[in-house]
Image: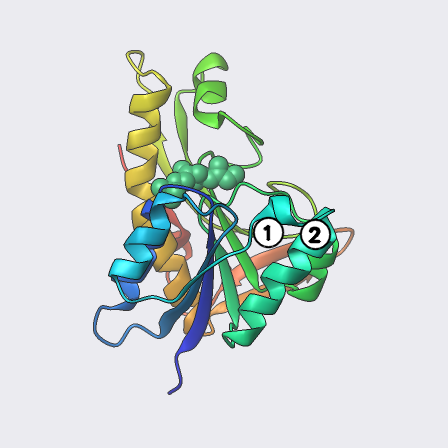
Amino acid sequence: MAKLKVGVLISGRGSNMAALIAATRTEDFPAEIVLVVSNRADAGGLAIARASGVPTAVVAHRDYPDRESFDRAVSAELERAGVDLICLAGFMRIFSPWFPARWPNRILNIHPSLLPAFKGLHVQQQAIDANARVSGCTVHIVTSDLDDGPTVAQAAVPVLATDDAETLSTRILATEHELYPLVLRWFAEGRVRLEPREGQPPRVVIQGVPPDAALLWRP
Ligand code: GAR
């Protein structure tokens, strides 16, 4: 069967991108990364992608007068590469409404908190400041609302009394590298469905996996 073609968008280090590349190179993985796009030419992840033999493109947001023209340029790169699904992996730009409308239910994001708690930036520090005892990461479908959209899966870790933002980030990041490839596999296997709900946003149903498979608890 043809593999799902994935485009990964990054802005920096690219450790989630690297985890996705590694996963897709394991035997019989049903998706392949066909393009990595960065909005920054100095993103560390670009070198990792190139060293892995994955095509890369830089679309510098500063070269565009507004969000939508930048989004259209990114989209054109993804279309040229024949992308079916987009994975945001530390991509730190906010889209115009045009982008999620162009790729409806075909953009995933990973966010380092248990959404809907702690949106925006410095979310690990937000969790510590809020005295949260548990945090983690969320993979969700991207809609036009920032850090919102149907949750596909989450991983939870403890927040220790001794944590600072860096130690908590490291603990969460390890679960990100586990969760994102898992979700990508479910997408590529066609297991992820959106179930409409009366008066509420749709809910994600993952077919053919145990009900608790979409929660990783890593104490
Ligand atoms: C990750 O922790 C990711 O969840 C977060 O940025 C980091 C990127 O690391 N993303 C966001 O905060 C998006 N709102 P990476 O470049 O090593 O994957």
Residue 160 sits in which quadrant? Answer: top left
Out of 15 and 167, give the one closest to the viewer: 15
State yes or no: discs 1 and 2 in contact (Cβ < 8 Å). Answer: yes
Q: Is residue 166 above or below residue 174?
A: above
Please, what is the three-letter code of the amino acid marked with disc 1? Pro
The residue sitting at 73% across, 53% down in the picture is 68
* For marks 1 and 2 on the same chain, the one whose residue lies earlier in the sequence: 1
Q: Secondary structure at mark 1?
A: loop
**Mark 1, residues whose alpha carbon is within 10 Å: few (<14), some, or many (≥20)?**
some
Count of numbered labels shown in the rendering: 2
Type of colouring: rainbow
Residue 47 shown left or right of residue 199 in the figure: left
Q: Secondary structure at mark 2?
A: strand
Ligand 1 sits in quadrant: top left
Residue behind mark 1: 150
Q: Which mark is residue 201?
A: 2
Please, what is the three-letter code of the amino acid marked with disc 2? Pro
Residue 143 position in % (x across, y down)? 66, 52
Image quarter hosting the N terminus: bottom left
Residue 98 position in % (x across, y down)? 74, 57
Q: Which mark is residue 112?
A: none
Residue 111 shown left or right of residue 48 in the figure: right
Residue occupying the far bottom of the picture:
1
